[in-house]
Amino acid sequence: MTGELSLAVALDGAGWHPAAWRDPAARPSELFAPAYWLSLVREAERGRLDFVTIEDSLDFDGRPELVKGRLDALLIAARIAPVTAGIGLVPTVGVTRTEPFHISTQVATLDYLSRGRAGWRAQVSHRPGSDTADVLGEAADHVEVVRRLWDSWEDDAVIRDAATGRFVDRDKLHYIDFAGRHFSVRGPSITPRPPQGQPVVTALAHNRPVYEFAAANADIVYVTPADAAQAGAIAAEVRSLTDRPVKVFADIVVFADPERKARLDDLAGAPFTSDAHVFAGPPGDLADLLLAWRDAGLDGFRLRPGLLPTDLTAIVDGLLPVLRERGAFRREYTASTLRGHLGLPATPNRYAAAGASA
């Protein structure tokens, strides 16, 4: 593959290294301040990155050396949306402990607040003793309900006809009548169809069953290959599972300074490990890696800064200029929506299409 890369960054606390909060460059006293998150997103927007993801979890790790507590990712994104202009905002929200009706309205609202820059990382959590197939089935139903609710209002359903006293055209609101094993939802939504029609749905996948879920339900699938050959093989496997347009991104943890990473490892008492490939080195070497993996078949990357804000700034000021010199990354935004940044097609309303053909 050739051409420009799609690039995102994954924001999590003080960074992805568990000892990141202990580094002198970290800002642990600000982790629960909205201004901290806004500063990170604005830094990513300065680099004209496609989007940021914001991590979230309902799990609580009891180890005292780790950062404890977090702000709600979707609410962080809602706070940031009105005061940013170009970057996509993709909060993480779980699909196994939440109600799809609520998620549909919240992400739709984020799309309005951001003027079409919203996405959603649908996080699948495996409960102890749960069956993987059942968990993934519930997750698939959850995403399907959310997507149907986004379509339950046609784009021109709001008419604001003062003369007749009709604010909406009732014929352009639709029941979704979803009845499945895990959810039964009649609809319609209480929120009009989002500006993008369908905000961008993303999911992280590590193995074949989750590849199948993500390929069927997401617009972007994050995968975790170890090298270029595996990246190409996984990308081909994911695409083989669907006829839908789907983007395949690789997750990579990034440390701009190997010596700083070594110091953080010493503070943590063990070398850093991750589900994703870990890179530590100069921007030129990282650019080489990204382009080699792109040529193997990937559409883009979600970079996880090991230390925030240091490694995020290194991505913006070190990596991106190198990629631009090689014609592999944009200099300015050329679209106003997240779907536009990613080159994803417009999404027709399934119920409007059904009504037109009836």
Image: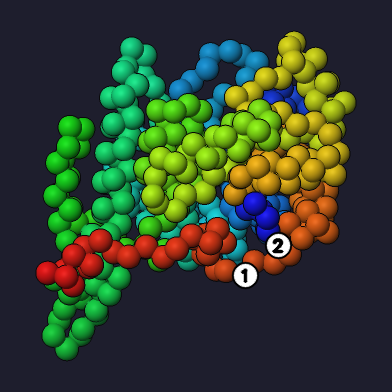
Q: Residue at x 57, y 61 (%)?
A: 341
Q: CA–CA distance between discs 2 and 1? A: 8 Å
| Rendered-image quadrant of the C terminus | bottom left
Return the residue nearer the eye: 342 or 235. Answer: 235
Instruction: Check disc 1 and give the amino acid type.
Output: Thr
Determine if residue 33 is in view: no
Residue sitting farthest toward the bottom: 163
- In front here: 53 or 209? 209
Say what secondary structure mark 1 lies in: loop
Numbered tag placed on residue 330 in the rendering: 2
Q: Which mark is residue 334?
A: 1
- The numbered mark at residue 311 is none
Residue found 20% across the figure and 76% down from its top: 167
| SS for callout 2 | loop
Q: Is residue 231 above or below residue 131?
A: below
Give x and y (percent) for residue 149: 26, 54
- Residue 143 spot, x, y in % from top left: 33, 43
Q: Would you call the spot at circle 1 few (<14 residues within 10 Å), some (14-19), or many (20 or more)?
A: few
Callout count: 2
**Residue 157: percent from left, percent from top:** 24, 72
Question: Which of these two is toward me, 154 or 14?
Answer: 154
Residue flagged by tag 2: what amino acid is it?
Arg
- Occupied quadrant, residue 46: bottom right
Above/below status of 28 relative to 315: above
Decide if residue 354 is in sight here: yes
Q: Residue at x 29, y 45 (%)?
A: 144
Whether residue 83 sits left or right of residue 331 in the image: it is left
